[in-house]
């Protein structure tokens, strides 16, 4: 989750960063075009008019930059669902690639369990990992959803409910209502961003001021893992609540997981993803298909972005579960 103040302060630095990158890209493009025209003029043995070459290069650089900026804006705003549709193909490819690597890897189950429980961040208690394979989500779970340090490290258990205001009761995987919270970076890839149906669009969750929900992920797996084993949950739906609504974390008789993430662009609301426990496995008897989802030597994690919470990933795109 990212609160409104954090969004404002982050956007300032992010926009400055984007502007600097755009200026550098424009300068590089202009320089390349200028040198290219200069080279062509010399090869054709024409009289070199430096001012003319500079003017033509500038016009081309401006034109190409405007086109690039337009495409970037359309993608960022997810106009015509451009970003959502693009990510669908990219993530499918990445998924197939990591599955092939996982099938070939010979890392033992005990070693995978150790990677899952490795204490990678000081000052936080490692709880395990959460994987949502259909959305390419793989995040470490830590112990503090109510601090920047905790949320910047990955997912965290959330336990302050309408019944337990102070969060004295520590949630247990596979029992009752296990609350999880994590950032939505509005990119469809990092943190719990992939749980929002359309990036940068309030619909279908918020329509004409009415709080709605979505069933687009119904039936998909949510896998939790700790030192004891793997807990296989199935998504039953998504609802939308205000940022102050904590009753979603109230204790339940049946085992379920409740995932909390921001809605973008209306960040005062929270998307609640509900899933119910279907089966519990030990590391020894869990299906290989589930075990390999937590093989950090070949599976990428998605906890960090450079503009908000830079850091070393725990997966194959970082320190590979501490084996790198």
Image: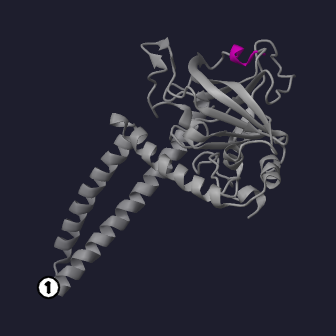
Image check: 58 left or right of 303? left
In the image, is 248 to the left or to the right of 133? right
The quarter in which the N terminus is drawn is top right
Closest to the observer, 24 or 116: 116
Where is residue 196 shown, x and y percent of the image?
52, 31
Q: Quadrant of residue 289?
A: top right
User: Exactly how many numbered labels are in the figure?
Assistant: 1
Q: Residue furthest left?
A: 46
Asked whether the viewer can see residue 147, the reply is no
**Is 161 rendered above or below residue 12?**
above
Q: Is residue 221 magenta?
A: no
Q: The magenta stretch spans which residues?
A: 246-251
In percent of width and height, residue 324 lies at 73, 64
Extreme residue in the right direction: 168
Q: Which residue is mark 1?
A: 44
Residue depicted at 52% across the width and 41% down the height? 12
On the question of residue 153 being in view, the answer is: yes
Colour pattern: one colour
Q: Position of residue 16 (x, y in %)?
A: 49, 48
Q: Residue at x 23, y 67 (%)?
A: 57
Residue under the point 20% across and 77% down: 50
Is 91 positioned to the left or the right of 273 in the image? left
In the picture shown, does residue 208 fall above or below 46? above
Image height of 191 relative to 320, above or below: above
């Amino acid at each position: 989750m990212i609160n409104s103040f954090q969004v404002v302060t982050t956007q300032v630095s992010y926009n400055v960063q984007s502007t600097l990158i755009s200026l550098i890209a424009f300068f590089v493009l202009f320089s390349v075009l200028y040198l290219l025209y200069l080279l062509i003029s010399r090869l054709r043995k024409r009289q070199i008019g430096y001012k003319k070459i500079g003017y033509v290069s500038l016009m081309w650089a401006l034109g190409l930059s405007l086109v690039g900026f337009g495409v970037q804006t359309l993608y960022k705003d997810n106009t015509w669902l451009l970003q959502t549709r693009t990510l669908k193909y990219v993530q499918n490819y990445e998924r197939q690639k990591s599955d092939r690597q996982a099938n070939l890897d010979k890392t033992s189950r005990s070693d995978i369990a150790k990677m899952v429980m490795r204490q990678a961040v000081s000052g936080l208690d490692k709880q395990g990992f959460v994987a949502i394979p259909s959305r390419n989500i793989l995040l470490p779970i830590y112990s503090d959803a109510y601090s920047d340090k905790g949320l910047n490290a990955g997912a965290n258990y959330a336990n302050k409910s309408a019944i337990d205001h102070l969060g004295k009761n520590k949630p247990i995987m596979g029992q009752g209502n296990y609350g999880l919270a994590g950032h939505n970076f509005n990119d469809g890839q990092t943190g719990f961003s992939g749980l929002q149906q359309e990036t940068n669009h309030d619909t279908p969750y918020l329509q004409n001021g009415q709080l709605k929900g979505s069933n687009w992920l119904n039936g998909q797996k949510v896998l939790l893992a700790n030192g004891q084993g793997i807990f296989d949950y199935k998504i039953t739906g998504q609802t939308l609540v205000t940022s102050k609504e904590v009753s979603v974390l109230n204790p339940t008789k049946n085992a379920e997981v409740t995932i909390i993430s921001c809605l973008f662009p209306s960040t005062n609301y929270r998307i609640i993803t509900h899933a119910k426990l279907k089966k519990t496995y030990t590391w020894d008897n869990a299906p290989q298909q589930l075990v390999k989802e937590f093989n950090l030597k070949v599976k990428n994690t998605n906890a960090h972005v450079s503009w908000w919470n830079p850091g070393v990933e725990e997966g194959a795109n970082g320190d590979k579960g501490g084996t790198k």
